Image (tube, rainbow, N blue to C red):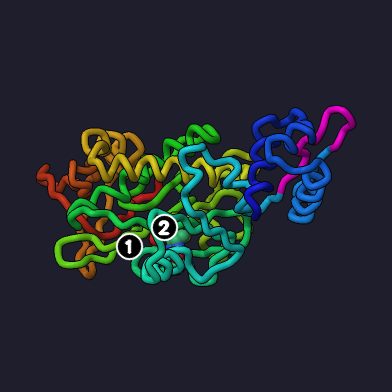
């Protein structure tokens, strides 16, 4: 996507649903009006639709439903515009693609987005169903100069930040299930997977992956997943603008990451997590390998560990494991 097309899209989106004159666009970009028209014809072939009215100019009347790199760039806030974005129709896993780019020496930070994954991965090596059905598969790559123990709060803080973004974006109240699930009305709509490579006592690099069901219909899920999964669109009842959401997500994750890197989140994150926590106060079972630990979920501590209260009222902390609710909430 050429810089000219990104600027054209930015101007049209900023004025939506109003018009932008061809002359103003031509003057802004230092090219002829015919050249503007040619670029717009190219954008039409990518799924954009424009209305052109004499003496008023152009306005945007349609946009591609799938991810579009130029449109996301056009929608990004100005301070994020130099962030490299890799937008792919299809990839094995955005986390794997990010890891390959890191290994090849790609400058950080950068973002990999895909409309479909053929080998999407979840925690414990599980499959993350990643069909081309209007959902978002995203990975953010960093090279933090931080000790590895600082990582324990990152996924949790990003989870809180993504919940806040979702509420701002479409009004839904998002829930968090420790340590990496985004849930709505008892169903999972998103999962986070943070993977880091560690050298001695420093993190070498880190990839934060997010799979978020944005627009998939309930019928998109295979087998028994249909009863456990949901999407934002299913919850709101209307499809979301995927590119606008992706741009907002990028801005929010980058902001949350810089707060994490500075340690600015430390005072707020446990309280913020507890506010979204769907387990708190419920009887749960924590699985750690073959070990099963039952208790009442009591939120998280300042290091991000799960707190469980046992039958004798003692509280224990757990930094790893998988939680299931004793009964469905
Ligand atoms: C989980 O709930 O177990 C975590 C799921 C994480 C899925 C995302 S999709 C984007 C990124 N690429 C992957 O292969 N996995 C993560």
Residue for point 65% across, 53% down: 2
User: Is disc 2 placed on a helix, strand or loop?
Assistant: strand
Q: Earlier in the sequence, mark 1 or mark 2?
A: 1
The magenta segment is 52-63
In the picture, the quarter occupied by the C terminus is: top left
Task: Tell me, yes or no, whether the highlighted magenta stretch contains residue 57.
Answer: yes
Q: Position of residue 4 (x, y in %)?
A: 67, 47
**134 lies left or right of 113:** right
Q: Residues within 10 Å of mark 1 (few under 14, many from 20)?
A: some
Tell me if residue 103 comes above or below residue 55 in the rendering: below
**Does mark 1's beta carbon lie closer than 8 Å to ligand 1?**
no
Can the viewer see residue 217 in this picture?
A: no
Q: Which mark is residue 195?
A: 1
The answer to which image quadrant residue 222 occupies is bottom right
**306 lies left or right of 254:** left
In front: 219, or 204?
Answer: 204
Asked if disc 1 and disc 2 are in contact, CB closer than 8 Å, the reply is yes
In front: 184, or 256?
Answer: 256
User: Is disc 1 placed on a helix, strand or loop?
Assistant: strand
Q: Position of residue 289 (x, y in %)?
A: 23, 69
Q: Residues within 10 Å of mark 2 (few under 14, many from 20)?
A: many
Residue for point 36% across, 70% down: 103
Q: Which mark is residue 209?
A: 2
Tell me if residue 254 comes above or below residue 319 in the rendering: above
Predominant SS of the magenta segment: strand
List the single residue furthest toward the right: 54
């Amino acid at each position: 996507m050429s810089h000219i097309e990104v600027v054209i899209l930015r101007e049209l989106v900023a004025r939506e649903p109003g018009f932008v004159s061809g002359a103003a666009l031509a003057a802004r970009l230092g090219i002829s009006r015919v050249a503007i028209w040619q670029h717009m014809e190219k954008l039409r072939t990518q799924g954009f639709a424009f209305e052109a009215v004499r003496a008023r100019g152009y306005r945007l009347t349609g946009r591609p439903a799938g991810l579009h790199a130029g449109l996301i760039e056009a929608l990004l806030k100005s301070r994020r515009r130099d962030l490299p974005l890799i937008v792919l129709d299809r990839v094995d896993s955005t986390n794997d693609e990010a890891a390959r780019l890191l290994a090849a020496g790609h400058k950080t930070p950068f973002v990999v987005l895909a409309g479909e994954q053929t080998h999407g991965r979840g925690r414990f090596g599980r499959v993350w169903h990643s069909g081309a059905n209007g959902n978002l598969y995203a990975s953010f790559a960093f090279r933090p100069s931080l000790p590895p123990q600082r990582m324990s709060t990152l996924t949790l803080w990003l989870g809180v930040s993504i919940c806040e973004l979702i509420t701002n974006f479409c009004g839904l109240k998002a829930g968090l299930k420790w340590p990496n699930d985004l849930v709505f009305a008892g169903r999972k709509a998103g999962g986070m997977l943070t993977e880091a490579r560690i050298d001695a006592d420093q993190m070498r690099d880190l990839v934060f992956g997010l799979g978020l069901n944005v627009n998939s219909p309930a019928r998109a899920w295979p087998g028994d997943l249909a009863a456990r999964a949901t999407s934002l669109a299913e919850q709101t009842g209307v499809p979301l603008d995927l590119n606008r959401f992706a741009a907002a997500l990028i801005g929010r994750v980058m902001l949350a990451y810089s707060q994490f890197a500075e340690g600015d989140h430390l005072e707020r994150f446990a309280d913020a997590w507890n506010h979204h926590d769907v387990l708190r106060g419920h009887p749960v079972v924590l699985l750690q390998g073959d070990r099963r630990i039952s208790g009442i979920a009591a939120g998280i501590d300042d290091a991000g560990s799960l707190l469980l209260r046992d039958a004798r009222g003692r509280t224990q902390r757990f930094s790893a494991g998988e939680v299931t609710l004793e009964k469905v909430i």
